[in-house]
Image (cartoon, rainbow, N blue to C red):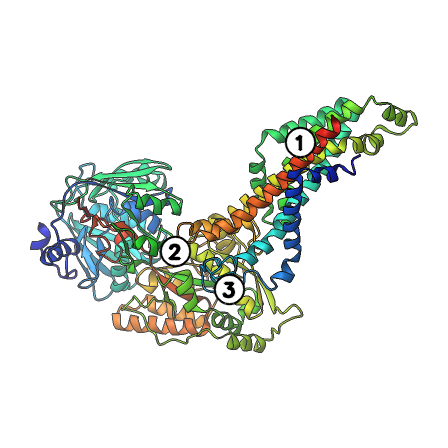
Amino acid sequence: MTLHRRTLLAGAGAIGAAALTRKARAQGGPAPRTGGILTVAADTEPRNLNPAMVASNGVFYVASKVIEPLAEMTTEGDGLAPRLATRWEGAPDGRSVTFTLREGVSWHDGRPFSSADVAFSAMRLWKPLQNLGRVVFKSLEAVDTPDARTAIFRFGEPTPFQMIRNAVPGLASVVPRHLYEVGDIAANPANTRLVGTGPFRFAEHRPGEFYRLEKNPSYWEAGRPYLDQIVFRVLPDRGAIAAALEANQIQLAAFSAVPLADMERLSRVPGIAVIPQGYDGITYQLTVEINHRRKELADARVRRAIAHAIDRKFVVDTIFLGYAKPSTGPVPAFDKQFYTPDVPSTPFDRRRAEALLDEAGLPRGANGMRFTLRLLPAPWFEQTRQFGDYLRQALRAVGIDAQIVNNDAPAHLRAVYTDHAFDLAIGSPVYRNDPAISTTILYESGLPAGVPFANQYGYASAEMDGLIRRAAGTIDTTERTALYQSFQKLAGTELPLIHVAEFTFITVARRSVMNVANNPRWATSHWADTWLSS
Amino acid sequence: MRDDLLGRAALTIEGLIGLSLLMAAAALALAAPLLLPGDPFDIVARPLLRPLADPAHLLGTDRLGRDILAMIVHGARPSLMTALSVAAVALGFGMAAGAVAGMLGGIADEVIMRLADAVQTVPSFVVALAVVSVLGPSLPGLIAALAISAWTAPARVVRSEVLRLRGAAFVESSLLLGRGRIPVALTVVLPNAVTVALALGAVIVAGALLSEAALSFLGLGDPNRPSWGALIAEGRQVMRTAPHVIIAPGMALFVTVLAVSLVGEGLAKALSKQTS
């Protein structure tokens, strides 16, 4: 294997898959078996399956096996494992990043992979079209390709290498230039019939039934993948997923597709394992989004009162059945680079909440309520809806009458992020391993209406905007980290939105599926080393 | 004779059981705020408490620890309210439309009955789904949505009754006195055709109860009121682990629909005795 011979400078560290297999052998684990069909549950069928355009976990779940990023997250070493790139190095002035690309890689249609594909993906897809890439690659001016194995990203503004590194696993999926250079990229048939370099080739999609991927026999890593096929069976009904697992009709369900309440029972079923690892790199946060245009909610004391009215322990224990952690702020504790626990806290304290509301000049009226507001729980997860039910009761206890408004996904997006027709909303933003990728956008002001998962809250603070701007242009890692810690403190003081809990997901799998959850984005990684014991 | 129809229906065994069950349900629904005061959505105990495990929460609790009995009893109010209102609106409008169509004949008859045909070609639940999606989940919207499709059956039944009675001597004499055809249709003919339509009322109530539950089940109910359909949807998530969460509201719905159907059965029996 080329991997073992190669010395990795920036990417020095364990080579995820190979290292884990070696470890398994050293521990006396069985040798991987080649062959077999892995059938897994899928609950959505994204209209556009191209991860270079749509960076979302629903897309990655299927597409990550076909289309590879430049590098993948790992728990070992410096946190990045090589995929299409074998080396990466940032210039000290923050104006360029050089990727050295893997040799001997070819696309599923047989054409060779080269730096031109990387340059094309970056300039034509990630930067102008991709939901997250628009932020991260904002100042990317050009990608130079001095030879087929080198891609040099050139930035107009100093861009922190730390952020680019953190963004690569999710944002840097490479698609073939030769299929995309002609015509409208958004309408390209390869957006649904994927062509990549990954361990599996896209075989077919039957809408409402399944996606089928088959082994790529000429994958760059010799001997991989182990599986012959992966079938994603579309099973929108959660109860059906649990039953299909028990009947061994599917071998794996990721992203907590099985209701949490069923986990304990399933964990006792012989042959089934409940695996809470493998999602640290895609931590979700349960948040209360606040419309500051509402005069009561523009008062920080009222927002603080709402935060004090929430019993985070109850939320974690009852709604997430322990599969979550209370949040302290916009950066989850998992992130060892940026997280600081040293922020103003709002422990559960109804008396304090009531005192703050009284102080804000909002006494209880004749019906016992202080004021009424609309509460829009996002329909994304079972838990966002349940937390809506909980928050309604928690707010009533301190005299705020919250009326729940349920919407389907498009109507919810429009109401919150375009029309601003809400007072409180329950959100679940994803933390993507660097506050600059998808977190500070929840705090910075001046975004046009219609940008989803962003500050559509009417919150504008010069201090916050200044801090975000300064951090975005800071190259020095230590200084940058310190700025994001100040950001967390200021977020805790002004409390424009309330972070309640951070949660990842759970995989339920038959014990015959091996090498599950062996990296922090496992469900959305390539599964080249996944195998089935007989 | 119309007055004692209900009495005679109650004397049939079906009618007796149905009426008692229905009255018990109505009494529970009316007394809900007295029996189980406070917000039925309050989180009062450990989540997923089993039925009878705690005498304070006879039917146990749901995933958040809310009392299932309280939600079912409070949920009976909107369910019954909706169903009875739908029946009242559909019967009132349907019977009037049927009487007018039958009495006037000609163009009026054509227009009304072709409209009924048109309404009946669209599945009623699809109409309800569309109306609720547009109007949003409110009680009047829900009633309108379900009544839109329900009025055609009473209209047809009453129309055929009116066609039968149109030539009767008492109708002819009313017309000869110089009264208009529509007033005669509504005040003279309709009261004599009403008994037939009443039995249909039970069918409409039962259908509306189920449709209301189905809409709430799909998340199109009012989330700020407890509802059986929403409870069933909640219970479905934990069906394998805590079946009581779905069984309890399911039974409530089943028993109520059964009671209404039994009353309808009793009415039909009493009616057939009367006509034979």
Q: Position of residue A46 (x, y in %)?
A: 37, 44
Q: Chain of mark 1?
A: B
Left or right of A134? Residue B204 is right
Q: Is residue B129 above or below residue A324?
A: above
Q: Which residue is mark 2?
A: A261
Q: Quadrant location of residue B46?
A: bottom left
Left or right of A498? Residue A2 is left
Q: Is residue A436 above or below residue A304?
A: above
Marks 3/1 in contact by CB < 8 Å: the verdict is no
Q: Are marks 1 and 2 on the same chain?
A: no
Query: Which amino acid type corresponds to the residue marked 3 in the rendered image?
Result: Ile
Separation of residues labelled 1 and 2 (CA atoms): 45 Å
Q: Position of residue B206 (x, y in %)?
A: 61, 40
Q: Which residue is mark 1?
A: B153
Which of A181/A437 is in front?
A437
Which of A364/A264 is in front?
A264
Q: Report crowding for label 1: few under 14, some 14 to 19, many 20 or more residues within 10 A (C-alpha).
A: many
Q: Chain of mark 3?
A: B
